[in-house]
Amino acid sequence: MIQDIMDLHTHTIVSGHAYNTLYEMIDSAARKGVSLLGVTEHAPRIPGACHPFYFVNFRVVPREVKGVKLMLGCEINIVDPDGSLDLEPRYLKGLDFGIASIHDPCYPSGCTISQNTQAYVKAMQSPYVHIIGHPDDGRFPVDYETLVCAAKEHHVLLEMNASSLHPNCHRQNARENYIAMLELCRRYGVSIVLDSDAHSEADVGNHERAQALLEELQFPEELVVNSSIEKAAAFIPWLNKAPYLDV
């Protein structure tokens, strides 16, 4: 079992379809021994999500609460095959870190494998994108070798999203796609991050399905950043600030 001290992809009621407040999510993290919690509200193109102004006021939120170190970011939507993002640079600059994802309400249907792969690769080139979120959905097929090699080139983490592995998740073929992606990550030495994508406090830090698949594949622990804030800080510069490295 990989030591797991962080969960960098979670949502609160601000995202419009999650069910707990920021401080309820922090309370859950504290109870479960999650040392580092990332809260990444959905960007504006998701129905019901917050106004971009939300992302300019993070200075008022303490970055350590109840012993939990807190990072405030955004799950930014990739909106076309050119890798365009739905949050303007003036708002992106205020994020502690960014996750870029494809979501079906925000991205055109019917794109080819080449177009979807290009969308991810172009998004990785943004200085505000540190993680590619749930690159596992069979509705948006990709060339995983190109994706993995691009993540290595642009020094971006690939996410293994535990929510995608839930049997009732709307994303398709996540397990098979993760097996393909992880084997390529092993081959090329590309790091991943396990995230819960929690939309309720019950799922904060819940990486059980992802952990089980890693164990099944005997995936190397050194390529999983969840065991060390220092490892994650190599990809997310904000983590090099105090108090994050004081663990």
Image: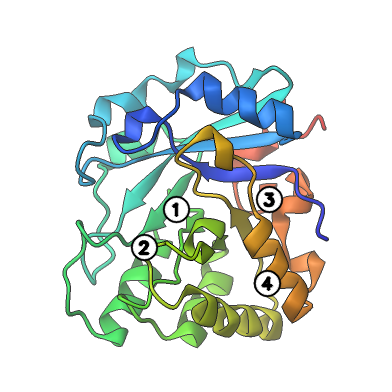
Mark before the other along the chain sequence, 4 or 2: 2
Residue in the image at 56% along x and 80% along y: 181
Asked which quadrant contains residue 184, the reply is: bottom right
Of residue 162 and residue 51, the one placed in the foreground of this image is: 162
Q: Are marks 1 and 2 in contact (CB under 8 Å)?
A: yes
Q: Give the quadrant of the C terminus.
A: top right
Residue type, label 4: Leu
Mark before the other along the chain sequence, 4 or 1: 1
Residue type, label 3: Ala
Q: Which residue is mark 4?
A: 213
Secondary structure beneath label 1:
loop
Residue type, label 2: Ala
Vertical position of residue 40 compared to residue 192: above or below: above
Query: How far apart are the two marked residues, 4 and 3, measured between alpha carbons?
Result: 21 Å
Q: Which residue is mark 1?
A: 129
Near mark 3 (Cα within 10 A), the count class, few <14, some 14-19 or many ≥20, is many
Relative horizontal placement of residue 160, taking residue 59 as reference (left or right): right
Query: How far apart are the two marked residues, 4 and 2, measured between alpha carbons?
Result: 27 Å
Q: Which residue is mark 3?
A: 232
Residue in the image at 37% along x and 78% along y: 138
Q: Position of residue 48 (x, y in %)?
A: 21, 36
Secondary structure beneath label 2:
helix
Q: Position of residue 44 (x, y in %)?
A: 23, 40
Q: Are marks 4 and 1 in contact (CB under 8 Å)?
A: no
The circle on residue 123 is 2
Vertical position of residue 25 compared to residue 18: above or below: above
Vertical position of residue 161 compared to residue 186: above or below: above
